[in-house]
Image (tube, grey):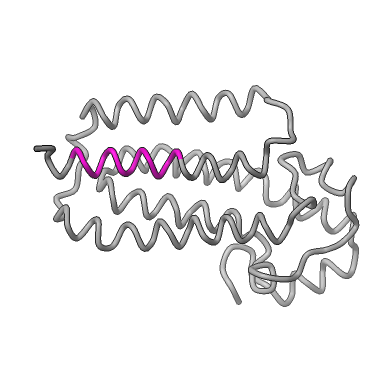
Amino acid sequence: MIKFELLIKIIVIALVILFIAIRLRFTSHYKFTPRLLVKNVIIIILFVLYIGNVFDFASIGFSSYLRVFLGFPVLFLGIYLFFWSHSELGENWSPVIEKRFAKSKKLIKTGPYKYIRHPIYTASFIVLFGFFILTANWILIGIPLLILIAFYIYKIPREENSLIDNFGQNYKDYMKKTGGLLPK
């Protein structure tokens, strides 16, 4: 009989793979980049360390059942918001800010973009929080959280400046009505 903790680990890894597969659905038309390689190597290293119980010393003593009961809904909420946000953008999404406007000149203000300007980033934090609840491990979440925060601190201002350059006053008005990562 498989221990419940091992079962949770297997499910977490399956959900990470699902999240990556959803992401690949939207990025398949872009070339493989060194940045993507680094991200995948970090994910693989964290997988190996997670399965190998290397970070068990950083575990938090939450009940396994409570973690599953709370973690799955949060995780699925994040995955849903991530998928919905990408779907709303459609062809307007690009991993490279400068290439985004080559295909479309339309500012998307529907779906989650009606309330927040960066719902994909918000979804990433929700997904990470869901994984935190499931893994209950400070190190396994701390490393990706620090990387995510550093990445978004760098990326969001560049992206917003590009959007202002491209859409002008229309985007500035949109900024006044919506929150960056959380609804106003």
Residue nearest the viewer, comparing 122 with 2: 2
Q: Quadrant of the N terminus?
A: top left
Q: Is residue 10 magenta?
A: yes
Residue nearest the viewer, comparing 31 with 177: 31
Query: How far from the left and from the top, in percent, is residue 173?
Result: 81, 74
Q: Quadrant of residue 141?
A: top left
Q: Quadrant of the C terminus?
A: bottom right
The magenta-colored residue range is 6-17
Q: Residue at x 82, y 68 (%)?
A: 172
Q: Residue at x 33, y 38 (%)?
A: 140
Q: Residue at x 25, y 48 (%)?
A: 136
Relative vertical location of residue 160 with respect to residue 169 in this rendering, above or below: above
Q: How many marks?
A: 0
Q: Is residue 150 left or right of residue 168?
A: left
Q: Is residue 75 magenta?
A: no
Q: Quadrant of residue 89?
A: bottom right
Relative vertical location of residue 114 with respect to residue 128 in this rendering, above or below: below
Q: Residue furthest toward the left?
A: 1
Q: Quadrant of residue 98?
A: top right
Query: How far from the left and from the top, in percent, is residue 36?
Result: 61, 29
Q: Residue at x 52, y 46 (%)?
A: 149
Query: How far from the left and from the top, in percent, is residue 81?
Result: 55, 61
Q: Is residue 64 left or right of residue 143?
A: left
Residue nearest the viewer, comparing 4 with 163: 4
Residue nearest the viewer, comparing 169 with 42: 42
Q: Is residue 156 left or right of residue 15?
A: right
Q: Residue furthest toward the front?
A: 1
**Predominant secondary structure, magenta span:** helix
Query: How far from the left and from the top, in percent, is residue 126?
Result: 45, 57
Q: Is residue 32 left or right of residue 162?
A: left
